[in-house]
Structures are given as structure tokens and as C-alpha cells.
Image (cartoon, coloured by chain):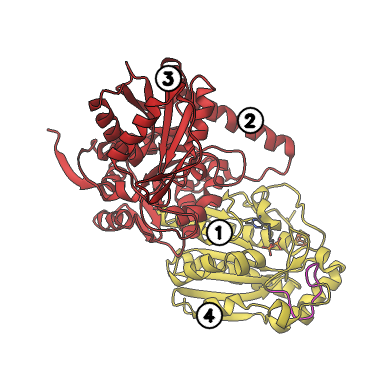
Chain colours: A yellow, B red
């Protein structure tokens, strides 16, 4: 009998604890599939910092080290500099990478650090209960922007990926989404390409993934997926942002 | 043949680190310790298996240290007071993830930006936590060039043995001082025991996790007790001190690092005045050598603590002495370096105190500078 749905080798059999409709579950699976496909499971090291996906090591069956909130790029740099022939990736939320960890991320990109960042943009702080994130879009209601994000009070959504593209050391940056089967396919291709960029020792690579957080958006999984396509994608359009690989 | 080399403290530390197998250094410039990263940068440039990186901040550098430790390297960072404050979050994580690393603090005057003169204002930060959570940090306090070399070797070994971060606490004066040093032979890295916990890719073994998050309180409690037992073992095994001219002493001065060198000069002068005075110098600040100090407190009339601060270690001295004899304090904070004459004067005053009761409050010295006596 032909197996139509099998678990990637790089994914542990543990059931996901993420909320129904959460993008993290899909992205974990995609990362595991790409690691399998490239045959790099035995030389990959992942760095999940504080955030909803800090427990990614419960699911991904590769060596994994937690990082303090925001410091994933620095921790990954330390690992990679010691183990040049390994594949090192970070798995960060928007709060982590685009607020508290902005400096570490920009400098890792600028140095052309041979690491890959998986940047999961869900427009809120998921783990801490839905506060405003640097990527919260204007007018979006969060627990700390109850009347909707207002630019003069709360600042504007930060397009970190575009900023990183300016850095000379960044080589490949793409934004995708996991709100549709097509988006998931594109995400898979992008993550694959990002890892290959690292394997070819070319420089810093990053995939930003627009990812639903139905719980904190107070939407059903279907509504959340629709909101990614209709609203988030307007501000953060999925596209190849930089490719000099 | 053992060859003596004349070198400044920061360079001694760098050379000793390399000989101890340090192959990764991450730092950020701050005075008064820049000669150390500069030494590492030029030495590592000549080695093909060593990594020097100037990070974008102390936050980044301590987290790069974390990464290099995760990957199994012997790794070091250094800074001075304000930079060490930024590293505290990372130090807490290193302790929690049981990662070996060596952190050097060449203390300067503070708080805030303070100044770049030698100070001992970071004692509390170093030995009482500094970062968050229930952890301890091994803290070495060298006083001489040779000790910088020896303790640096020991720091790397202990960090690996106990899987814990270790701090070397010095100051800017110590970093600049030129002294003759005999270095230990360079370590053969292949002779070190394999670290069976590092992350280097799950090749032919199950995947590993290095973490500090324990959402289950029972697991976190169990982990805290496990750390506690480790710290207990360290407290039994490594406390170290110098006891000098104490056999017939009636008064003991307790000081560490640069302050202890000045204190020793003060002791010599007091001795030439006929006073029976000795020195107790903790070489490890955590674990604090409480037992030998307590034994000494049984035999003397009075203990005087001298620090280049308004009084921090004095609390640990009082805890160790537990009322066995009176304890007084003399301190010069803010980067002021006392002279041995000044200390001898203070020793004479303390020596003459009937029953040696404690002195308190601020007194005027030379009619111009306020000093802290308590
Ligand atoms: C120094 C520090 N500050 C704050 C926190 C609390 N905290 C944990 S995760 C997080 C942000 C989570 O948001 P994001 O990075 O976007 O990831 P998500 O949970 O949405 O996937 C915060 C603020 C922390 N762990 N450490
Ligand atoms: S809170 Fe949001 S990001 Fe976190 S698991 Fe739930 S849906 Fe996912």
C-alpha cells in the first residue's frame, strides 16, 4: 500500500501542543521535511528562543539549544563559528527577532553569518498572551493596543526583512505565508533554498513566514488564515526580498 | 626550563587562557580591559583553530559565548563593570544550561558609567547572583600576575569539570601591572575528556537538547536542588585563601585582589611599628573560605576588612566570623587607590581600640577626604 502521509524522520512522534490552526505546527513539519530532504538531520543544530515555539525541541528530532529571548542569532553565531560544517538555524517569533533581538539579527546578517533564520511573523506576542508586536499592523487590536495600533502612539509595523536586505552580508531573504496550501509549498521551497544557501557557505539567509495565531487574534482558524491573506499580506507582501545567492 | 616572562596582567590572562585551551573569544570594547581582547585578537589571528569576534554588544558577546560553549569549545569573554551588567542575563542562562565558560571582569569605578579607575564595587554582583534565579558563580580573585596565570588555567578546568560559568574578578590596576610570570605548559586539547553533552549534530546518536525552561514546577524544583548539590560540592572542594603572618597576630586585615596587595604593604609597615598584624586574603570569593576565617577569628582580637568599595565582602566576613571577634571596615570607593601607609594607620587605630569595638560612620582623612569606616 502506498503511504500518503508519513511523519518526516526529523519530526518526533510527539503530538503538537500548539493551538488549533496555529502556523507553528505547519512550519515545524515543513522544516523537518526540508531537513530530511537535504539529508542534513545529523549535522543540523536548531536554536529556538523564548516564544510559543521555544518547545520546538519537543518535536524536531535534531540537536536543539534554547536561547534567551532575542539572542538566537548570537547563540547561533557562537555555534556556527565553532562548527563551520554544520547547519545552524534559528526559529524566532516577530517579537523575538524584530523587537528585543533586532541588534543581534541585523549584525548577524551584516556579518554574513552562515546561519538561517526562520522568522515566524504572527503580528502578536503569542506566548505572553497577545500583546502588541513590532509587526502588529495599524489598527490591529491587541491586549496592549486595545483601541487598535495607532502610529503616533505605538509606532508603525516594522519590516525587518526589508531592513535586513540592505545588509551586505544577507544573501537570501524571502517572505511567504502558511495560510494556504500554495503558501505552504512556497514556504517549503523557500526554507529549502535558505538551507542550501547556508550549505553553499554564501551568507545569511532568512525566511519570514506569515503565520496565523487564531487564539490571540480571537478568530477561528479559517478566519485567521483569511486575515493573513487579506490584511497582513497587504503590509507584508509575500515575495523574494533579496536573492544574490 | 621554566622561563619567566614580564607581562601586564591582561596579557598574562590572555596567554594563560590560550594555554588552557581557550579557542573562542567574544567581547566588546570597554576600558580598562581592552588590552585583553586585543591580545586575543592578535594571538588568534596566528592560529587556525581559534575564533576571535568583536560583537555588537556585551549582550551579543555573552550569547555567542553560550553558543560556542554549546558547541563544546573552551570559551571566554571579558569586560568591565557596565559591560558585565549587560552580561548578567546570559550568565544566569549559562548556569541554568550548565555550560562552561570563563568571564573576566576588570572592575572600574561605579555605579553607572562611573570612571575607569580600579574599584571593587562589583563584589555583590559577582558573588550574590548578578543575574536572576537561584544559581552561584565561581569567582576567582587573583592578586598577582602569577596568580592570574594559575587561576585562569584553573578557571577553564573547573568550568568544564563542574559544567558551570566561572568569573575572574580583577580591576584595571591589576590589568596594567607588569609582573614576571611562569606560564603552565599549553594544554593538549585532545587530552581533555570528551564532552558527551555538546550539540554537534545528532550523528549516530539520539538528538540532544540544551535548555533552561522547566514549565513543570516539580521538574524546576528538582533541577534547582540538583544545582544546589553541585554548588555544595564546589563549596567543599575549592575554597582557597592566603593566610599571611597570622601565627602570632592579634589583628587580621581581610582583603582580596589589588586591595590585598595594598593591605599586605600595610601589614609590613604595621609590623615594623611592632604591631602583631596579619592578612587573610580570599582567593575564591565564591565559594568564600569561611571556615579558615572562622578558625582565625577564634585566635585574634579583631578583624578589619579593607575593600575598594563602601563595604560588600565585609558582609561575608561577618557571616563567617559569627561574632567570634569584632569586625570593622575601612573602604575607599569610587576608584581611589589607598596607600600602604594609609592602611598601616588604619591598622594602628584598630589595633589600639580597647576590646577593639567597631568603628562606625565616616571619618576625615588628612582633613580632606571622607572615607567610609564602619
Ligand atoms: C528578557 C525577556 N523578556 C521578556 C520575556 C517574555 N517573553 C517570552 S516570549 C515573548 C515574546 C513572544 O512573542 P514572539 O517572539 O513574537 O513569539 P510567539 O510567541 O508569538 O511565537 C516574551 C516577551 C522573556 N522570556 N525574556
Ligand atoms: S498562542 Fe498563537 S502562536 Fe502561540 S500556539 Fe497559540 S496560536 Fe500558536
Density class for disc 2 (Cα within 10 Å; few <14, some 14-19, many ≥20) is: few
**SS at circle 3:** loop
Mark on residue A242? 4
Q: Nearer the viewer, residue B217 or B247?
A: B247
Disc 3 to disc 1, C-alpha distance? 53 Å
User: Seen in the image, is B124 located left or right of residue A201?
Assistant: right
Q: Is mark 2 within 8 Å of ligand 1?
A: no
The x and y percentages for residue A229 are 77, 79
Density class for disc 3 (Cα within 10 Å; few <14, some 14-19, many ≥20) is: many
Is B89 above or below relative to B244?
below
Q: Residue at x 44, y 45 (%)?
A: B309
Q: Quadrant of ligand 2?
A: bottom right
Q: Nearer the viewer, residue B206 or B106?
A: B106
The x and y percentages for residue B194 are 42, 36
Q: Chain of mark 4?
A: A
Disc 1 to disc 4, C-alpha distance? 23 Å
Q: Chain of mark 3?
A: B
Mark on residue B301? 3
Find the magenta span and give its range: A135-145
The answer to whether marks 2 and 3 sit on the same chain is yes
The answer to whether marks 3 and 1 sit on the same chain is no
Q: Chain of mark 1?
A: A
- Are the two marked residues, 3 and 4, in contact with CB atoms closer than 8 angstroms? no
Residue at the far front in the pictured view: B367
- Are the two marked residues, 2 and 3, in contact with CB atoms closer than 8 angstroms? no
Density class for disc 4 (Cα within 10 Å; few <14, some 14-19, many ≥20) is: some
- Are the two marked residues, 3 and 1, in contact with CB atoms closer than 8 angstroms? no
Residue to which mark 2 is pinned:
B225
The x and y percentages for residue B79 are 41, 54
The answer to whether marks 1 and 4 sit on the same chain is yes
The answer to whether marks 1 and 2 sit on the same chain is no
Amino acid at each position: 500500500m502506498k503511504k500518503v502521509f508519513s511523519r518526516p524522520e526529523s519530526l518526533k512522534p510527539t503530538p503538537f501542543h500548539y493551538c488549533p490552526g496555529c502556523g507553528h505546527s505547519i512550519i515545524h513539519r515543513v522544516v523537518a521535511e526540508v531537513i530530511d530532504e537535504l539529508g542534513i538531520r545529523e549535522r543540523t543544530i536548531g536554536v529556538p528562543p523564548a516564544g510559543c515555539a521555544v518547545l520546538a525541541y519537543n518535536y524536531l528530532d535534531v540537536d536543539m539549544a534554547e536561547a534567551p529571548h532575542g539572542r538566537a542569532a548570537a547563540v547561533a553565531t557562537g555555534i556556527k563559528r565553532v562548527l563551520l560544517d554544520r547547519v545552524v538555524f534559528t526559529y524566532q517569533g516577530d517579537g523575538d527577532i524584530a523587537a528585543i533581538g533586532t541588534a543581534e539579527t541585523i549584525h548577524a546578517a551584516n556579518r554574513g553569518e552562515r546561519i538561517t533564520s526562520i522568522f515566524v511573523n504572527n503580528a502578536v506576542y503569542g506566548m505572553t498572551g497577545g500583546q502588541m508586536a513590532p509587526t502588529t499592523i495599524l489598527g490591529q487590536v491587541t491586549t496592549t493596543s486595545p483601541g487598535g495600533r495607532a502610529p503616533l502612539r505605538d509606532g508603525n509595523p516594522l519590516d525587518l526583512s526589508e531592513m535586513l536586505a540592505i545588509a551586505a552580508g544577507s544573501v537570501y531573504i524571502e517572505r511567504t505565508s502558511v495560510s494556504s496550501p500554495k503558501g505552504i509549498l512556497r514556504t517549503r521551497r523557500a526554507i529549502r533554498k535558505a538551507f542550501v544557501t547556508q550549505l553553499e557557505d554564501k551568507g545569511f539567509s532568512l525566511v519570514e513566514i506569515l503565520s496565523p495565531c487564531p487564539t490571540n487574534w480571537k478568530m477561528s482558524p479559517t478566519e485567521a488564515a483569511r486575515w493573513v491573506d487579506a490584511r497582513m499580506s497587504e503590509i507584508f507582501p509575500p515575495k523574494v526580498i533579496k536573492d544574490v545567492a | 626550563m621554566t622561563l619567566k616572562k614580564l607581562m601586564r596582567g591582561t596579557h598574562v590572562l590572555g596567554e594563560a587562557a590560550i594555554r588552557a585551551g581557550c579557542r573562542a573569544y567574544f567581547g566588546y570594547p570597554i576600558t580598562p580591559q581592552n588590552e585583553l581582547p586585543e591580545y586575543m585578537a592578535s594571538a588568534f589571528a596566528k592560529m587556525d583553530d581559534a575564533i576571535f569576534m568583536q560583537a555588537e554588544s556585551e549582550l551579543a558577546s555573552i550569547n555567542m559565548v553560550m553558543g560556542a560553549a554549546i558547541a563544546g569549545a573552551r570559551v571566554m569573554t571579558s569586560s568591565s563593570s557596565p559591560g558585565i551588567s549587560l552580561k548578567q542575563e546570559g550568565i544566569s542562562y549559562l548556569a541554568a544550561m550548565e555550560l562552561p565558560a570563563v568571564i573576566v571582569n576588570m572592575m572600574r569605578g561605579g555605579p553607572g558609567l562611573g570612571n575607569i579607575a580600579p574599584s571593587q564595587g562589583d563584589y555583590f554582583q559577582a558573588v550574590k547572583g548578578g543575574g536572576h534565579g537561584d544559581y552561584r558563580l565561581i569567582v576567582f580573585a587573583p592578586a598577582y600576575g602569577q596568580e592570574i596565570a594559575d587561576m585562569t588555567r584553573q578557571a577553564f578546568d573547573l568550568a568544564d569539570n563542574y559544567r558551570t560559568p566561572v568569573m575572574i574578578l580583577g580591576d584595571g590596576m591589576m590589568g596594567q601591572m607588569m609582573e614576571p610570570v611562569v606560564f603552565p605548559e599549553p594544554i593538549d586539547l585532545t587530552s581533555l575528556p570528551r564532552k558527551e553533552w555538546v550539540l554537534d549534530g545528532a550523528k549516530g546518536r539520539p538528538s540532544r537538547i540544551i535548555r533552561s525552561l522547566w514549565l513543570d514546577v516539580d521538574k524546576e524544583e528538582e533541577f534547582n536542588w540538583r544545582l544546589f548539590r553541585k554548588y555544595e560540592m564546589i563549596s567543599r572542594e575549592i575554597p582557597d585563601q592566603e593566610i599571611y603572618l597570622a601565627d602570632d597576630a592579634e589583628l587580621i586585615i581581610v582583603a582580596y585582589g589589588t586591595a590585598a596587595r595594598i593591605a599586605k604593604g600595610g601589614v609590613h609597615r604595621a609590623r615594623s611599628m611592632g604591631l602583631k598584624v596579619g592578612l587573610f586574603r580570599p582567593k575564591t570569593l565564591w565559594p568564600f573560605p569561611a571556615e579558615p576565617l572562622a578558625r582565625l577569628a577564634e585566635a585574634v582580637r579583631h578583624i578589619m576588612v579593607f575593600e575598594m568599595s563602601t563595604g560588600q565582602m565585609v558582609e561575608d566576613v561577618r557571616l563567617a566570623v559569627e561574632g567570634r571577634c569584632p569586625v570593622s571596615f575601612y573602604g575607599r570607593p569610587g576608584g581611589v587607590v589607598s596607600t600602604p601607609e594609609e592602611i598601616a594607620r588604619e591598622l594602628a587605630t584598630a589595633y589600639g581600640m580597647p576590646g577593639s569595638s567597631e568603628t562606625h560612620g565616616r571619618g576625615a582623612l588628612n582633613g580632606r577626604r571622607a572615607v567610609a569606616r564602619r
